[in-house]
Image (cartoon, rainbow, N blue to C red):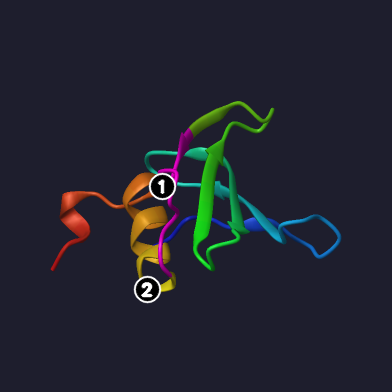
Amino acid sequence: MSWGINNLIIDKKTQPKMFRMTVQGHHHRGHVYIFLNGGDLFDVYLTTNRGTIKQRTDEMGIYNDQLIDWIDERVERISDYVI
């Protein structure tokens, strides 16, 4: 995976806690927001640089072991990368 990550922000003041990064991938260019929700799962939002939500996880959220694959599938992964 090579998302071209920059502008990392970890906001400990917001509730729930939030992590934001700017990515420049094959499928998505903009921000990725990651929130830890009340069910100890992650809510992930892919937005434009202006904040328009393009994609998000479902209402339940996703587990820690699914986080990287979920983001990579929507930001960068193409079939040529799969071994």
Q: Residue furthest front?
A: 39
Q: Amino acid at mark 2?
A: Asp
The stretch of residues the image draws in magenta is 55-63
Residue at image point 45% right, 54% down: 61
Q: List x then y, in percent, for residue 56.
A: 46, 40
Left or right of 18, for residue 81: left
Badge 1 marks a residue whose secondary structure is: helix
Q: CA distance from mark 1 to mark 2?
A: 17 Å
Q: Residue furthest bottom?
A: 65
Q: Picture quarter containing residue 7? A: bottom right
Mark nearer the N terminus (1 vs 2): 2
**Circles 1 and 2: CB atoms closer than 8 Å:** no
Give the mark toward the camera: 1 or 2. 2
Q: Which residue is mark 1?
A: 75
Left or right of 12, for residue 68: left
Instruction: Say the numbered circle drawn on residue 65.
Output: 2
